[in-house]
Amino acid sequence: MKAARRQRSDEKGAALLSVLLVVAALSAAAVVASAAIARQTDTSRAAARRADAGWAALSAEALARSAIADLMRTTAGQVNVLTPGLGEPVAFAARGGVISLSVEDAANCLNLNSFASASDAGVLTARTGMIRLLDGIGVPEGDASALADTLADWIDADSTPRARGAEDEYYLSLDPPYRTANGPLESPRELAAILGYTPALREALAPLVCALPGPAQAALNLNTLKPEQAPLLRALYAPDLRLQTAERLLEQRPTGGWRSVEDFEALPDIRTLPAGAKASSAISVSTTVFAASGLISTDGGTWPFDFIISASEGQAPRTIWRRLGED
């Protein structure tokens, strides 16, 4: 009798244990399922937000092209620092948020990708321009030469370092190791990976350099250059034009700008430069390339965007480069 009761008790205990195990298994499964559903929901929401941001960016791009088309129609590209709509941030509503947008002249910079020129002469011109620009912001000549070499080595397709440059052999010795890009830059921020380009130097170069698609160097627009961009103007005439003179010329620019390159070159400071120092082909009073940038703000976060838009008189503006989000 006692044995029978003990057996029934053991059976009840085993059954209870089985029930508890089943409950525990179901609970664990429920937790896993809930976590999976939550992840799927978060992923779906993130995808939806990214899609909304993408549509908003397309709207911003279309608005930027429209604004640039209006500028070209009314100015034939002869924009200046007082041109309405240039450099003036605007904001407009988009689905689920707000888009802020600003259009700037994109010609007033040294194109770092000019080092990607297919000709030796083009690379030499790029190197000379970079050295002159670095000299204008106070970088010693020897250091400027080395910085030009490391930039050229980063962009060119070969693995042979220049005299003061650096190729894969150097970068692979770092911790963590990495290789050279062997191609054009997507953004001036990539200078951070190149030997010699310290944070302080990159900050000084920020308003002076760009990474336009292709190796072409756009002519500087004399009427949209800012006084703090005087090193760009000085670099065209170095060493015959002092930085202080370039700054003064921009600060004393006529209201509405110079009417022509000839008017600028008639100024005493430019007219008296040696004949070999003339830079007529590198300057202009018009612009054909613009940069549009801004921020998409929604309840799901913020997304920066950047476009480079080419525009010529009589032709519809076209986007030649775009980026949504950080580098």
Image (cartoon, grey):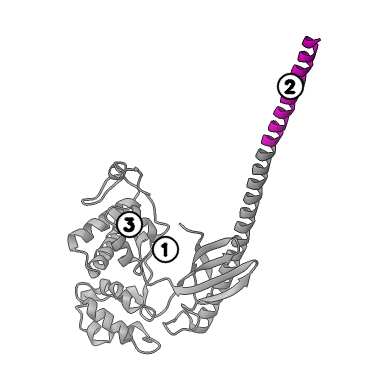
N-term-proximal mark, 1 vs 3 = 3
Choose between 3 and 176: the one closer to the eye.
3
- Of circles 1 and 3, which is in front? 1
**In-front residue for pair 92/19:** 19
- Give the magenta range: 1-29
Q: How many angstroms separate mark 1 from mark 3 (CA)? A: 18 Å
Tell me the residue that label 3 is attached to.
Answer: 119
Q: Secondary structure at mark 3?
A: loop
State the quadrant of the N terminus: top right
The mark lying in front, picked from 2 and 3, is: 2
> Residue at label 2?
13
Find out whether the residues at labels 2 and 1 contact each other: C-beta distance under 8 Å: no
Where in the figure is residue 166, as x and y percent of width and height? Answer: 27, 48
- Say which quarter of the image contains residue 16: top right
Q: Amino acid at mark 2?
A: Gly
Indicate which disc, 2 or 1, sits on the residue closer to the N terminus. Answer: 2
Tell me the residue at 28%/64% (across/down).
130
